Amino acid sequence: MRAAGIVAVAVFRESVRDKVFYNLVLFALLLVGASIVIGQLTAGQDVKIIKDLGLSATSVFGVFVAIFVGISLVSKEVDRRSVYPLLAKPIRRSELIAGKYAGLLLTLLVNVVVMTVALYAVLFFLSRGVPENIQHAWDAPALDPALLKAIALIYVDLAVVTAVALFFSSYSSPMLSAVFTLGVYVAGQFSADLKRFDQIVTAPAAVMAAKAAYYVLPDFSRFDVKLAAVHGVPITGLYMAVSILYALAYIGALLFGAMTIFARRDFK
Amino acid sequence: MSAPAIRTHELTKDFPVGFWRPRPYRALDRLSIDVAQGDVFGFLGPNGAGKTTTLKLLMQLVFPTSGDAEILGRPVGDVSVRRRIGYLPENPYFYDHLTAEELLDYYGRLFGMSAAERRTRIGATLDRLGIAAERRLQLRKFSKGMLQRVGLAQALLNDPEVIFLDEPMSGLDPLGRRDVRALILELRDAGHTIFFSSHILSDAETLCSRVAIVAKGRLAAAGRLADMREFAVQGWELVMANVPAAALDRVRARARGVTTIAADRYAIDLAPDARPEDLLRDLTAAGATLVSLNAVRETLEDVFVRRVAEIGDGARPSAPAGGQR
């Protein structure tokens, strides 16, 4: 897997060169701008709103990077034919897929870590000087460590999205991969509704299709604990562990699928 | 006896054509060739003959429908053999956000070279290809000819035993072509095996110890170029200037034809056995000056056209078994 590590570092460097991290500037501007405006408009709710906004922005920006960088990881190599000289080197196709995946995970990790630091910094400045009795009235402290649990699950969510994007891009065009990945991501947000589809619709075929989609599609809503974190509702270690294992199973299956398809693909 | 550097046996590739009801299109049909170690092997054919498909099959960029291939005695799917080969694709593209040095460093890491080894090899290879001054320039700023040199550099980085070059002269100006020819000969002298595809006969004439000609995906001929009757000299074209009138009369008696090109410039058509060097000596002694002397032979294109017609769509060619030495 040494070759996969080399590819991963190359992907990370390419992300830096392609200015993927510019989204961090936008994130910081959004957070700082919002905190100034919200500070003027709300009384005592600003910390909660900033937490909600910060977590949501971390997720949305991350999904954006995961999908749009993820779909181009393999397809760009194939379309531009840089894969020709690359695969003539001592590297297995499966290592290329693994390296591309690991490289984007590294990029996303840096992205999420910087956003987390920025969010805590803004929360620190917002809560500074707020009287203790008001702070006690909050659902959770401003610098609540539980936010890290929500952020960790956002990262797990991004890891699954990246695996979906990579899976589709291992055999289809970037445009189709983007559509498929977005489709899976959106449908996966409504996983619970798919399960309960028989309570709204009676047509057996539709119910069957919804049930099948429920079992095949990853349940992305499982990784969304933003509301709980913001309102100080405990997120148990067991919930975290099960969610991570659930994600690992999907990631494993998707990467295996991507590697299997890519391993037999002809580059015409 | 050592294993051939490259061996293909009945190598066949079909591509599906059509969206709704795909039909197989045979891009390569039962190609069998052997390339000995140390050979400069020209793989010739017109566009669409199956040259690039063959190279892609050898690089495992596409998989055969049937048949098999080996490089240095190992199946082409063996990743370890790629440490010992170099490959220049046709019209290569590399990551344009990288510099030439960074690209070679990336590939050097994949070859498992140490940092010191990479530094030495990258410097030496860029120097050899004449692009050392541009080593820190992003590839997006490179011209097509310079990219071709980068392509050659990455193909030579690991000092490969066997080098595959797909249309290596493509995109190069005359000076670049001369440099690549010199490089190939230098590599040959150093004992490397070179397999290169081309549709230009003169490249093969200058460089190749042996050639294979493919047309319509099938092997049309294989062997030494000099032994192929199609490429035997069919005459000579001698162009002379300042030819005195008396000398011109003597020329007319010995030539198949004389054409006036300009006031004092003549194109002299000689039979293959007419010994142009004798006539050249006579004319220069009489005060004429040499403009050019060329062997007239059937062009590769002519041979392709005829072979394609001979092969037709049905029967397999009765060409010599590929690469029998």
Image (cartoon, helix red, strand yellow):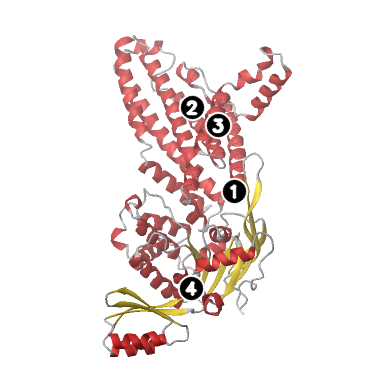
3D distance between C-alphas at marks 2 and 4: 58 Å
Q: CB atoms at circles 2 and 4 under 8 Å apart?
A: no
Do the residues at pointers 1 and 3 share their chain?
yes
Q: Which chain carries label 3?
A: A
Cα–Cα gap, marks 3 and 4: 48 Å
Closer to the eye: label 1 or 2: 1
Between the residue at mark 1 and the residue at mark 3, the CA separation in whole angstroms equals: 20 Å
- Mark 3: few, some, or many residues within 10 Å (few <14, many ≥20)? some
Which secondary structure, mark 1?
A: loop
Residue labelled with disc 4: B192
Q: Can residue A247 be seen in this view?
A: yes
Of labels 2 and 4, the one closer to you? 4
Mark 4, other Cα within 10 Å: few <14 / some 14–19 / many ≥20: many
Q: Is residue A155 above or below residue B15?
A: above
Number of other residues with Cα within 10 Å of mark 2, as a class: few under 14, some 14 to 19, many 20 or more: some
To which residue does mark 1 refer?
Answer: A265
* C-alpha gap between disc 1 and disc 2: 39 Å
Could you say which quadrant of the image residue B219 lies in? bottom right
Residue drawn 38% across the image and 37% down it: A20
Seen at 43% across and 17% down, the residue is: A140
Q: Which of marks 1 and 3 is nearer the N terminus?
A: 3
Q: Identify residue for label 3.
A: A180
Q: What's the residue type where badge 4 is placed? A: His
